[in-house]
Amino acid sequence: MVEAVVEDGEIKAITRPPSLDSPSSAKEEDVLYVPSEECEDIYAALDQYAKGQGKYKKIELSAENHTISRKSKIHRNIVPCLLLDSAKYAGLTIRGAGKDKTLLSGGAIHIMNKETKALVFQDLAVYNPYGAGVMVEKGAFNITFERCLFASCGGGGFWVSHKGTTATLRDCLSCMNSVSGINVFDSGTLDIYGEESRMTGNEAHGLYVCALNSLIRIHDGLSAAKISSGNKGEDIHERCGGKIQHFK
């Protein structure tokens, strides 16, 4: 299982899954079920989704480890990656069996352009040793991650950037990443909900927001100090006009 080892309120280590049995799920007509023995590479799941021509609304990753192995040309040379950059992915839900059971490993999740909207990721962990775990940018909007883990990535855990780009995290954990847990810049907006939201044990900052009109909005009566602690840099870092706002 993907487990966080906590000592004195700080995450000291992450254990990644060797193998787990695929959990059973209630069947839904609009769900594409993807066990690892049939589809280890997440791109193969997306190929099946595309071939469904609108039949599916969700992809369910029911097994323990799905790799990101197809290389894509993206900026910052962060390859391989799961690149979601067109209208054909709008409205898609990718659902795991739990952040302690389903792992997307070996690359970044890169979501970009304004046609890519209303994507939902649920109940999975992301591990990219080559760079950031998730990048949402260039106008992609209404992108949601629920009950997810971004851990031990070679860059920041979760990035949001560029004007018009909006993302939401609900009850997510970003920890032990090589840069900051959360990065918002270049006029991006991130909303954070949920008592289980945490950014801790990162090499740089917990919450980092930079540049005018860049926003991190924290809801449910939570505070930045509560959800971000135990990072090696600053737990809360606002810079060059970037702001963190609080809402009940």
Image (cartoon, helix red, strand yellow):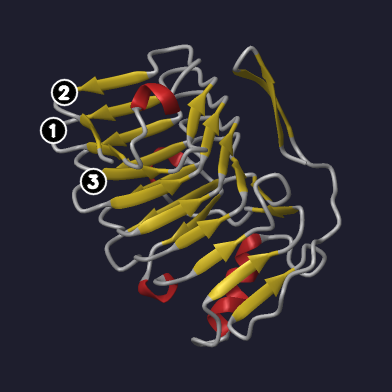
Whichever of callouts 2 and 3 sits on the residue coming sooner in the sequence is: 3
Q: In the rendered image, which residue does mark 2 sit on?
A: 240
Whichever of callouts 1 and 2 sits on the residue coming sooner in the sequence is: 1
- Gap in angstroms between the C-alphas marked 1 and 3: 11 Å
Q: Position of residue 151 (x, y in %)?
A: 59, 34
Q: In the rendered image, which residue does mark 1 sit on?
A: 212
Whichever of callouts 1 and 3 sits on the residue coming sooner in the sequence is: 3
Image quadrant of residue 27? bottom right
* Residue at the image position 56 percent from the left and 35 percent from the top: 130
For numbered disc 3, what is the local secondary structure?
loop
Q: Which mark is residue 162?
A: 3
Callout 1 touching callout 2 (CB < 8 Å): yes
Q: Nearer the viewer, mark 1 or mark 3?
A: 1
Q: Which amino acid is tagged 3?
A: His
In the rendered image of this protein, does residue 230 appear above or below residue 103?
A: above
Image quadrant of residue 236? top left
Q: Which amino acid is tagged 2?
A: Cys
For numbered disc 2, what is the local secondary structure?
loop
In the rendered image of this protein, does residue 89 appear above or below residue 13?
A: below
Q: Is residue 137 left or right of residue 27?
A: left
- Please tell me which residue lies in front, 140 or 221: 221
User: Badge 3, how many Cα within 10 Å: few under 14, some, many 20+?
Assistant: many
- Gap in angstroms between the C-alphas marked 2 and 3: 15 Å
* Residue at the image position 57 percent from the left and 24 percent from the top: 176
Check the picture and name the quadrant holding the N terminus. Answer: top right
